[in-house]
Image (spheres, rainbow, N blue to C red):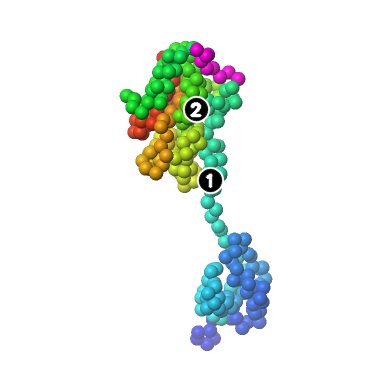
């Protein structure tokens, strides 16, 4: 065989071989359009000349076209058989899909106005505990408070949940309720900390507009964040977004944001995954500006 002539054995054949038919317009068009999202598959019995594709590519480049895939530019006198081209296009999550993912990892039944709690939701009767409600609301709305973490304890049946419900409703009416979470030992979504961070993050994304884009960005970049440790979730979905929003001078700052947590004693889990970790998350309020506060109710042991 003369030196420089390609072998005619195997899958590489001389373009003058009888089995290699010239490119038809349809085939040439398919080669030129392999960048289309749907892709295309070459029939197994077809034989395509890459040299012809290279000629077409050169022609496109000369005419300002050729934005697709360029295969073996300037290649000549050989062919490729049984070639499949697949184009994979990454579609980023939309804002709606990110919000749905966040909702799926929350516990809607834990909010103060959940329909799952409506049949037995306790709250203070009118003209009762007026002084206590007023004291808590003064703390909630004040710009200067000695502590941004307020805890109320009491024995079973002393009315802690009723007061937490009343405070949540009052804060909502005044526009300062950031989120609420009512633990319950009888509800699998509310008797453990698994959905705690996701629930607060979802509610805050709806109640505090300036924080929403930062929370959604985290979920978009890492949808597996909900599988991480509770502290990791809290830092990514609560602490960092809130800090970014409060430190942004162009972001509208809420006058006061209160997060109400009731029944912490009904949160099950070991010493490494239950109440201590929720308490640790609440203590993050110390690093926020005065407008962000946590109010926690739990049974006195």
Report x, y in % for residue 202: 50, 36
Q: Residues within 10 Å of mark 1 (few under 14, many from 20)?
A: few
Residue 106 shows in the view: yes
The quarter of the image holding the N terminus is bottom right
Mark 2 lies on residue: 172
Magenta region, residue range = 119-127
**What's the residue at 48%, 30% (across, down)?**
175
Q: Secondary structure at mark 1?
A: helix
Mark 1 lies on residue: 95
In the displayed structure image, the side of residue 43 where residue 169 appears, left or right: left
Per the model, the C-alpha gap separating discs 1 and 2 is 25 Å
Magenta region, main secondary structure = loop
The quarter of the image holding the C terminus is top left
Report x, y in % for residue 46: 66, 72
Q: Secondary structure at mark 2?
A: helix
**What's the residue at 56%, 44% (across, down)?**
96
Report x, y in % for residue 98: 53, 43
Q: Nearer the viewer, residue 247 or 266?
A: 247
Q: Are marks 1 and 2 in contact (CB under 8 Å)?
A: no
Disc on res. 195: none
């Amino acid at each position: 065989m003369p030196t420089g002539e390609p072998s005619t054995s195997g899958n590489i054949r001389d373009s003058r071989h009888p089995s290699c038919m010239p490119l038809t317009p349809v085939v040439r068009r398919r080669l030129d359009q392999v960048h289309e999202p749907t892709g295309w598959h070459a029939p197994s019995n077809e034989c395509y000349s890459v040299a012809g594709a290279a000629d077409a590519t050169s022609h496109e480049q000369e005419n300002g076209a050729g934005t697709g895939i360029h295969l073996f530019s300037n290649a000549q006198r050989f062919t490729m058989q049984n070639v499949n081209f697949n184009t994979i296009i990454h579609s980023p999550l939309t804002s709606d899909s990110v919000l749905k993912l966040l909702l799926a990892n929350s516990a809607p039944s834990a909010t103060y106005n959940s329909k799952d709690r409506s049949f037995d939701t306790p709250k203070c009767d009118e003209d009762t505990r007026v002084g206590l409600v007023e004291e808590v609301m003064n703390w909630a709305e004040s710009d200067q408070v000695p502590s941004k973490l307020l805890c109320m304890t009491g024995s079973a049946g002393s009315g802690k949940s009723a007061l937490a419900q009343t405070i949540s409703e009052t804060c909502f009416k005044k526009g300062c309720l950031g989120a609420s979470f009512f633990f319950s030992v009888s509800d699998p979504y509310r008797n453990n900390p698994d959905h705690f961070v996701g629930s607060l993050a979802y509610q805050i994304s709806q109640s505090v507009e300036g924080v929403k884009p930062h929370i959604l960005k985290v979920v978009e970049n890492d949808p597996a964040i909900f599988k991480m440790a509770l502290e990791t979730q809290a830092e990514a979905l609560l602490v960092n977004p809130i800090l970014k929003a409060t430190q942004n001078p162009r972001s509208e700052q809420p006058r006061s944001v209160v997060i109400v947590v009731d029944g912490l004693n009904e949160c099950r889990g070991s010493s490494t995954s239950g109440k201590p970790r929720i308490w640790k998350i609440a203590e993050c309020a110390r690093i926020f500006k005065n407008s962000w506060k946590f109010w926690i109710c739990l049974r006195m042991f």
